[in-house]
Amino acid sequence: MLLAAAGGIGVTYLQYGRIAETAAALPFVQASEPATADTSTTPPPGEYGSFTELEGLIVNPAGSDGTRYLAVSLAFESSSSSVVQEIKNKEVVVRDAMLNLLSERTATELSDPDRRTALKDSLRGHTNHLLTSGTVDRLYFTQFVLQ
């Protein structure tokens, strides 16, 4: 079973470029009425800060006994470029904190779209506790695959 999971992860990484190309080629359709937005995580149109990304985080959700995994990439946005640089400098520490926090969640919690905003807020809050030069304003999931 472990070999099958490792194979699945390997295929995901090998096919990621192709999947990203396909997703980029899809047309973007905007709804006529936007869904209610969480203003703490959604910037006003055209107003963005500096970004950095942690890619390829893979965890086994709590209680899954290694039979499930979450592959996730996170993007951090801050109005301060010094915060982005600090995250890059502390990448190992931030990555470890994100892995620990994500592995505490069950597959049920991680798969519920209604809990994503709370999960983002928790990840952002934990990151902000590690920083001394400012805060992360917004956190984005740039990849989120639960198997």
Image (cartoon, rainbow, N blue to C red):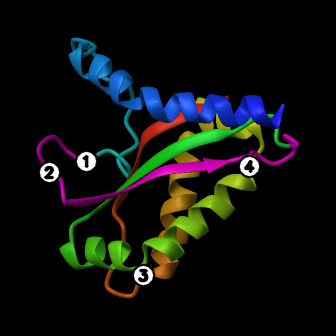
Quickly name the residue at label 3: 131
Quickly name the residue at label 2: 47
Quickly name the residue at label 1: 43
Q: Distance between the residues labelled 1 and 4?
A: 27 Å
Q: How far apart are marks 2 and 3 (CA)?
A: 23 Å
Q: Is tag 3's residue or tag 4's residue first in the polypeptide sequence?
A: 4
The answer to whether residue 108 is seen in the rendering is no
- Within 10 Å of disc 3 (Cα), the crowding (few <14, some 14-19, many 20+) is some
Identity of the amino acid at label 3?
Leu
Q: Do the residues labelled 3 and 1 touch (CB within 8 Å)?
A: no
Q: Identify the element where label 2 is drawn.
A: loop
Q: Which label sits in the foreground, 2 or 3?
A: 3
Identity of the amino acid at label 4?
Arg
The answer to whether residue 145 is seen in the rendering is yes
Q: Give the total number of marks visible in the rendering.
A: 4
On the picture, is 58 further left or further right than 29? right
Extreme residue in the left direction: 46
On the picture, is 1 further left or further right than 24? right
Q: Identify the element where label 3 is drawn.
A: loop
Query: Percent from the top left, x then y, of residue 140?
Result: 39, 47
- Within 10 Å of disc 4 (Cα), the crowding (few <14, some 14-19, many 20+) is some
* The magenta segment: 43-65
On the picture, is 48 further left or further right than 138? left
> Where 99 sits versus 6, above or below?
below
Judging depth in this view, the residue of 55 and 97 nearest the camera is 55
Q: Identify the element where label 1 is drawn.
A: loop
Q: Are marks 2 and 4 in contact (CB under 8 Å)?
A: no
Which residue is at 80% across, 37% downward?
Answer: 2
